[in-house]
Each structure stands twice: as C-alpha cells, then as structure tokens.
Image (cartoon, grey):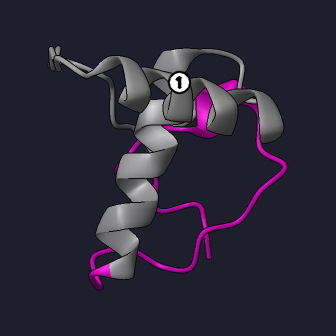
C-alpha cells in the first residue's frame, strides 16, 4: 500500500440512502474508481481538502493511492 507509511487500520461503516448510493456509483464510474470504497475515500479526501485540510486533489492515481490521508497529492 502506498500511503506514505499509513496503513488502513480503521473500518468506517456508513449508511446511505438510495439516491446517495446512485450518486456515489455515478461518481465512481465517471471517474473510473476501482471500487466504492476508493470512491468514498476520494470524495472524503476532496471534501477535507476543500475545507483546507489537504493539498489540491489530482487524478490519474492507482487504487492504492486513494487513502484519505495520502499526502502524495500536491
């Protein structure tokens, strides 16, 4: 895993509505994410970044790059 030494050690369970799941799947397929989990991590990272917690989001990464705390994106 390529997360700057960070390993995914916590599981986060989230309940979503049907419309949220459809929106997530639309995002996933339009951005060619490898899984729902990768799409959720990317959206979480983008949201945290938008609030000033991370550097600018970028695309074209491997699925192992979609860790929320991955500082590789600059």
Q: Reply yes or no: does residue 69 show up in magenta.
A: yes
Q: Where is residue 25 in the image (x, y as percent from the top left)?
A: 60, 24
Q: Most prominent secondary structure in the magenta stretch?
A: loop
| Image quadrant assignment for residue 40 | top left
Residue stretch rendered in magenta on the structure: 51-74
| Helix, strand or loop under label 1 | helix
Q: Position of residue 38 (x, y in %)?
A: 54, 27
Relative to residue 30, is residue 49 depicted above or below? below
- Kindly identify the residue that appears in the image at 43 percent across and 22 percent down: 21
Looking at the rendered image, the quarter that the C terminus falls into is bottom right
Relative horizontal placement of residue 2, taking residue 46 as reference (left or right): right
Q: Which residue lies furthest to the bottom in this view?
A: 52
- Kindly identify the residue that appears in the image at 60 percent across and 65 percent down: 73
- Kindly identify the residue that appears in the image at 17 percent across and 20 percent down: 14
| Image quadrant assignment for residue 9 | top left
Q: Which residue lies furthest to the front in this view?
A: 19
Q: Position of residue 22 (x, y in %)?
A: 53, 24
Front residue of 61/35: it is 35
Relative to residue 22, is residue 62 depicted above or below? below
Label 1: which residue?
22
- Kindly identify the residue that appears in the image at 60 percent across and 69 percent down: 57
Looking at the rendered image, the quarter that the N terminus falls into is top right
Q: Reply yes or no: does residue 1 show up in magenta.
A: no
Relative to residue 74, is residue 43 depicted above or below? above
- Disc 1 crowd rating (10 Å Cα; few below 14, some 14-19, many 20+) is few
Relative horizontal placement of residue 36, taking residue 20 as reference (left or right): right
């Amino acid at each position: 895993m390529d997360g700057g030494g960070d390993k995914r050690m916590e599981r986060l369970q989230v309940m979503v509505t049907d419309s949220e799941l459809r929106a997530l799947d639309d995002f996933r397929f339009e951005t060619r994410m490898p899984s729902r989990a990768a799409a959720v991590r990317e959206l979480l990272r983008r949201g945290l970044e938008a609030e000033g917690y991370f550097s600018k989001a970028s695309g074209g990464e491997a699925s192992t790059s979609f860790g929320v705390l991955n500082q590789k994106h600059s």
